[in-house]
Amino acid sequence: MEVPNTQENMSKCICGRCPSYIQGDTGAFCMTGASDKGPSQKGCFCDDCEIWSEFSLSGEGYYCINGKAS
Ligand code: SF4
Ligand code: SF4
């Protein structure tokens, strides 16, 4: 499911705690699209995020690499 890019949804993002996250990056990649900083897969915390269950997301996560949820 697409996740609306709202301030409320962005505030729930836990990308900042994830080992794949690059400091200073934007986060909320399921809403905004892939990172342009070239992150690599070191684990993804998306399935622990409130947004994951709220918008019935599924799959491997890694929106920072794969792009927006659809
Ligand atoms: S599902 Fe992942 S990318 Fe989307 S808000 Fe949660 S932690 Fe961030
Ligand atoms: S999308 Fe997943 S892998 Fe990428 S920074 Fe967020 S929690 Fe980590």
Image (cartoon, helix red, strand yellow):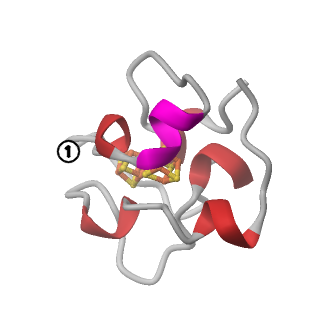
Pick the front one: 5 or 56 = 56
Residue 26 in the image: x percent, y percent?
57, 72
Which quadrant of the view contains residue 19? bottom left
Asked if disc 1 is less than 8 Å from ligand 2, the answer is: yes
> Horizontally, is 16 left or right of 61 in the view?
left
Q: Position of residue 22 (x, y in %)?
A: 36, 69
Query: Is 23 situated above or below 19?
Result: below
Q: Which residue is mark 1?
A: 42
Q: Report if residue 33 is visible in the image.
A: no
Are there few (<14), some (14-19), or many (20+) residues within 10 Å of tag 1? few
Is 29 colored magenta in this rendering? Answer: no
Instruction: Tell me residue 49's x, y (percent).
Output: 38, 47
Majority secondary structure in the magenta region: helix
Q: Name the residue at 61% across, 31% down.
A: 55
Dividing the image into 4 quarters, which one contains the N terminus?
top right
Please say if 25 is above or below 20: below
At horizontal 39% and vertical 60% (from top left) the residue drawn is: 15
Residue 8 falls left or right of residue 52:
right
Q: If the image is split into quadrants, where does the C terminus sit?
A: top right
Give the magenta range. 50-54
